[in-house]
């Protein structure tokens, strides 16, 4: 890697230890000078980092500020260093706050305070670091925050006030905060009222349902402002504003699948440093009319039924999904219908790939630009295929849908931003086989390695339930009684279960079952970076080899 010219290099004092501190355009490093160490209770005082050496990329510095005596932290460690400088010289100090990586993709805001003998040197350090930070133009300065006070365990407000607001304030980000008063408050405000020119991004404090509101508000507003009709447009206009997700819901799958953890402080730090992760959005249509957008799961059958049942149990909080999951599994309902789909070309890979979508994913990057060759572009237009049958579940995952329930996700190899969705068809099978399939979501075994599971990576798909074919949804309502007789004969196990399920669209129930789904590549951007490879955590020094 190219060596960067030094901007500043000084000997500064850190907790009574002398350090060589260096700043270039890319990293801030500090390294303890050789010191006499005193043995205290059998071990040595020192940094956990290699040879007392630390390295922080400038892009991961949150802020720098002059430190007053009251702010200085004490060295409470079991080790003691022989002071190298007289204490009267430590009158001037500055504190750098930066991102520190913890286990499980969590980030924390750490601080280091350097002491200087000279006021001017102290100011020079503060000024130079500030100048470096001001050049990071992707960082937001002003955010519009929506809090759902009733999502998940109803801790959205508390989480924002105690975990997130202090981080934003440390980074000097200004915020306008709206605590929602009813469902669709955030969506309507974004769509019709919000003065979006004032902001660099929108923050969603809540779960996947709250995120969906913000997604809908922002996309609709962008189309409206650009004169695009959501009903018929093949191409939608991407939104200029990024969305940050502070997880405070029940599943929080979009946060988990784009950051690697559901942790409010980690998400706040991704927002502060101005991360950017493009994301695919599916538009769902019925009879050429736009219904909804989806970024995670579109599920008919099992996941539709789980959601329908769980909505009646909202008062239970996140546990509702477990109860409804077991109940739906036991009911073992299957549904007949026809799926037609437009497969993605080979260059997009398959849902059974071993390669996963990770931070800086090359597959997604390829789709983001005009990097596709003419040949690849030609090859990306496929031919529609049709399949019909009896299905326990029909799932379309536009991203992995990883969440604490299934850390590898519903479709572990799905890409966040490749312009495709993974269609997963679970054909009718025994309860035991279905249980085996479900359990594989929670362990390392391949959940697609069953004869009754079929997977396709697609750009578009259509679904028509059997009793809909040739008719309209209204026809069904009118002939409901006649149909239910027939249905119960077909599925005697369920007593009088309906022959149709509902679509679970990112946790919202769709009223229509006959749908046409189209993937819009990278329609929105999040303040995230995708899940980082383990190596970044194991060896942060690879970042600092400059
Ligand atoms: N003030 C409010 N009162 C009632 N409902 C609200 C309010 N604000 C938002 N909502 C609605 O609450 C629903 C659920 O919210 P949210 O997604 O935050 O939590 P969750 O359902 O527990 O989590 P998840 O979606 O991750 O399962 C959303 O669909 C949203 O439209
Ligand atoms: C008997 C053993 C069972 C083991 C089951 C493991 C399989 C779990 C897969 C979970 C996949 C979640 C996909 C995410 C969907 C979200 O858009 C949506 C909104 O938050 N959540 C649900 O619909 C909530 C869906 C909850 C389903 C349980
Ligand atoms: Ca995708």
Image (tube, helix red, strand yellow):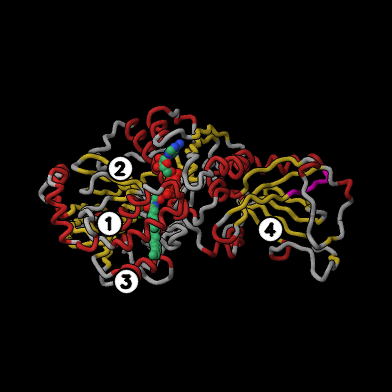
Are the residues tagged 3 and 2 within 8 Å (C-beta)?
no
Looking at marks 4 and 3 on the same chain, the residue that comes earlier in the sequence is marked by 4
Q: Main secondary structure of the magenta part?
A: strand
Pick the quarter of the image with the N terminus.
bottom right
Looking at marks 1 and 4 on the same chain, the residue that comes earlier in the sequence is marked by 4
The residue that mark 2 highlights is: 292
Looking at marks 3 and 2 on the same chain, the residue that comes earlier in the sequence is marked by 2
Q: Secondary structure at mark 1?
A: strand
In the displayed structure, would residue 525 be above or below residue 429? above
Looking at marks 1 and 2 on the same chain, the residue that comes earlier in the sequence is marked by 2
Q: Secondary structure at mark 2?
A: strand
Q: Is residue 116 magenta?
A: yes
The residue that mark 1 highlights is: 301
Q: Alpha-carbon distance for marks 4 and 3?
A: 53 Å
Mark yes or no: residue 16 visible. Answer: yes
Q: Alpha-carbon distance for marks 1 and 4?
A: 52 Å
Q: Alpha-carbon distance for marks 3 and 2?
A: 34 Å
Q: Residue at x 36, y 39 (%)?
A: 216
Q: What residue range appears in magenta?
A: 113-118
Q: Is residue 359 magenta?
A: no
Q: Alpha-carbon distance for marks 2 and 4?
A: 48 Å
Give the left or right position of residue 22, taking residue 532 as reference.
right
Q: Residue at x 57, y 42 (%)?
A: 158
Pick the quarter of the image with the C terminus.
bottom right
Q: Residue at x 71, y 50 (%)?
A: 112
The residue that mark 3 highlights is: 432
Disc tally is: 4
The residue that mark 4 highlights is: 54
């Amino acid at each position: 890697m190219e060596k960067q010219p030094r901007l500043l290099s000084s000997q500064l004092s850190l907790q009574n230890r002398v350090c060589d501190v260096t700043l270039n355009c890319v990293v801030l490093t500090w390294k303890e000078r050789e010191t006499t160490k005193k043995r205290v209770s059998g071990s040595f005082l020192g940094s956990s980092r290699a040879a007392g050496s630390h390295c922080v990329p400038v892009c991961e510095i949150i802020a720098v500020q002059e430190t007053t005596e009251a702010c200085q932290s004490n060295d409470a460690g079991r080790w003691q260093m022989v002071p190298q400088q007289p204490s009267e010289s430590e009158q001037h100090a500055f504190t750098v706050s930066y991102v520190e990586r913890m286990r499980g993709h969590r980030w924390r805001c750490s601080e280091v305070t350097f002491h200087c003998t000279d006021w001017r040197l102290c100011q020079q350090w503060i000024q130079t670091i500030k100048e470096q930070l001001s050049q990071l133009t992707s960082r937001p300065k002003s955010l519009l925050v929506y809090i759902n006070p009733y999502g998940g365990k109803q801790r959205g407000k508390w989480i924002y006030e105690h975990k997130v607001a202090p981080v934003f304030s440390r980074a000097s980000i200004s915020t306008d905060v709206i605590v929602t008063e009813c469902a669709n408050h955030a969506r309507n405000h974004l769509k019709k009222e919000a003065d979006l020119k004032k902001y660099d991004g929108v923050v969603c404090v809540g779960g996947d349902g709250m995120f969906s509101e913000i997604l809908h508000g922002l996309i609709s507003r962008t189309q409206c402002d650009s004169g695009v009709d959501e009903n018929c447009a093949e191409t939608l206009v991407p939104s200029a504003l990024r969305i940050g997700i502070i997880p405070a819901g029940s599943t929080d799958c979009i946060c988990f699948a784009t950051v690697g953890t559901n942790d409010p402080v980690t998400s706040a730090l991704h927002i502060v440093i101005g991360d950017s992760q493009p994301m695919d959005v599916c538009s769902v249509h019925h009879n050429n009319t736009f219904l909804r957008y989806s970024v995670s799961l579109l599920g008919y059958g099992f996941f539709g039924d789980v959601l329908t049942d769980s909505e009646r149990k909202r008062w239970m909080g996140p546990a509702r999904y477990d109860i409804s999951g077991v109940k739906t599994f036991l009911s073992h309902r299957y549904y007949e219908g026809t799926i037609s789909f437009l497969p993605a070309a080979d260059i997009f890979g398959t849902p059974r790939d071993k390669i996963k979508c990770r931070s800086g994913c090359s597959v997604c990057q390829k789709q983001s630009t005009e990097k596709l060759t003419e040949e690849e572009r030609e090859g990306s237009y496929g031919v529609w295929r049709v399949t019909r049958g009896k299905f326990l579940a029909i799932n379309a995952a536009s991203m992995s849908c990883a969440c604490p329930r299934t850390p590898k996700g519903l479709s572990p190899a799905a890409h966040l931003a490749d312009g495709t969705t993974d269609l997963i068809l679970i054909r009718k099978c025994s309860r035991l086989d279905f249980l085996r399939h479900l359990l594989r979501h929670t362990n390392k075994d391949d959940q697609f390695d069953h004869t009754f599971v079929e997977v396709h990576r697609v750009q578009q798909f259509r679904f028509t339930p059997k009793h809909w074919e040739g008719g309209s949804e209204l026809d069904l309502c009118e002939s409901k009684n006649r149909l239910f007789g027939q249905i119960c004969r077909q599925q005697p196990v369920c007593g009088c279960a309906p022959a149709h399920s509902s679509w679970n669209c990112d946790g919202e129930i769709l009223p229509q079952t006959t749908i046409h789904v189209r993937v819009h590549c990278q329609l929105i951007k999040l303040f995230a970076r995708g899940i980082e490879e383990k190596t970044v955590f194991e060896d942060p020094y690879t970042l600092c080899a400059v």
